[in-house]
Image (tube, rainbow, N blue to C red):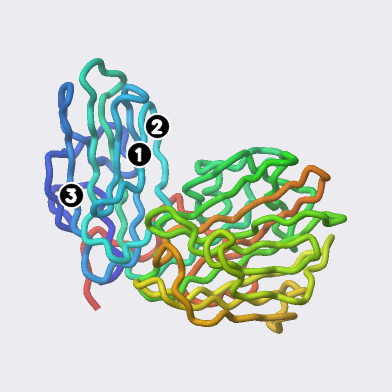
Amino acid sequence: MAVILEDFEDDSFAVSITGDWIRTNDQPLQGGSCYRSAVITDDQVSEVVVQVPAGAATVEFWYRMSSEEGYDTFDVDFGDTTVLRMSGDVPWMYSGRLSMAGVTQVTFRYSKDSEQSDGEDAAFIDQLIFNDTPAVWSNTFDVGPAGTTITTENSTAGGDPFNNVVGTPEYSSAQFFASSGLSARNPNPGADTHIDWQYVTQPGDVLCTRFYLRQVGPWTSTAGLFALLGPAGGVISKAWLFSDGILRIYAGNADAEVATIATALPINTWIRVELRYTINSAGTGTVEVWTYHTPDSTTHTATAISATRTWPGGKPTDAEFHLFHGAAGDHWHMDGVALGSAKLGPINFGAAMRSRTSIPTGARHRAATR
């Protein structure tokens, strides 16, 4: 397959779609039509099932809804797993690129409770795209203005949007890497916060991450930097930065130390950190870690690799980038974060800043073969 775009402009679909949703010209994102849940009454459900085309590695789509907030819901399921749930009045929003590894069908569902209605009483989707290229997620945080809280909605302009944010991280101009202009930080001492990409399982067994880091010291704390989660939500692995500047990688949240960078990370300067997890569907594999004190160098300062082991939680599905701010004021800035199926190397600002608000070049309404 190549890139497959279903734009709902006519009834001849590019992918197999079954269910009771209908085409409508009611406020489409692009073109003249979008797809709308059927007209239903209390305690009813309207759903459509889309078969994932063979060879698809990722899916992305836009959605909006107008409903009774907190009671009538829009759900998106990958098989038996709900990956998105919304309620209320939601303008057009981008899903982000979601991995299709192991997924054979996507279900879009609008459900009503036992009484009352509000708004248009419906959910809508548009510009449904399947792609056969494994995704590289990246974001440079160049949205702003500085001091604005990072959200799933506003992170789109910095690259690939995060689909989960915990706490109140913010865009900051106090420190940023190279020409990026802004970075991410936690403005609240004593609070943990993190920004996440979910549903990032790769078709293969390799999942890599890269981030630029600048500690603001003096450094006195121990805090989590990065975590991988499994399909049940448990922590597969977490990277911790200790008060002595040593980076340690653990199985689980802190169950067993499996790899250590013995060269302390410097403070008040930008560095680059890269990790490569190779974990199969049985949860067995390794982690490799590299640090670069010259952040755009291709020659690492230090490296470590774990022994092969069984990791708790299975094959990774979600990634969390943690932003620490200690009670004593020590904290860090992050920039140029990325995930992919191969070691990522130094940042490519042009790639990280690409817009996902329009249909990518080469996308077609009809399926194509190679």
**Local SS, label 2:** strand
**Local SS, label 1:** strand
Q: Quadrant of residue 255?
A: bottom right
Q: Position of residue 121 (x, y in %)?
A: 26, 25
Q: Quadrant of residue 109?
A: top left
Pick out the residue farthest to the right: 218
From this view, report whether residue 367 is shown above or below residue 145.
below
Determine whether, in the image, residue 94 is placed left or right of residue 75.
right
On the image, numbered disc 3 is attached to which residue?
Answer: 49
Residue drawn at (29%, 70%) of the image: 2
Q: Are marks 1 and 3 in contact (CB under 8 Å)?
A: no
Pick out the residue farthest to the front: 255
**Figure label count:** 3
On the image, numbered disc 2 is attached to which residue?
Answer: 90
Q: Nearer the viewer, residue 270 or 315?
A: 315
Q: Amino acid at mark 1?
A: Arg
Q: Amino acid at mark 2?
A: Val
Precedes in sequence: disc 3 or disc 2: 3
On the image, numbered disc 1 is attached to which residue?
Answer: 85
Q: Position of residue 144 (x, y in %)?
A: 66, 43
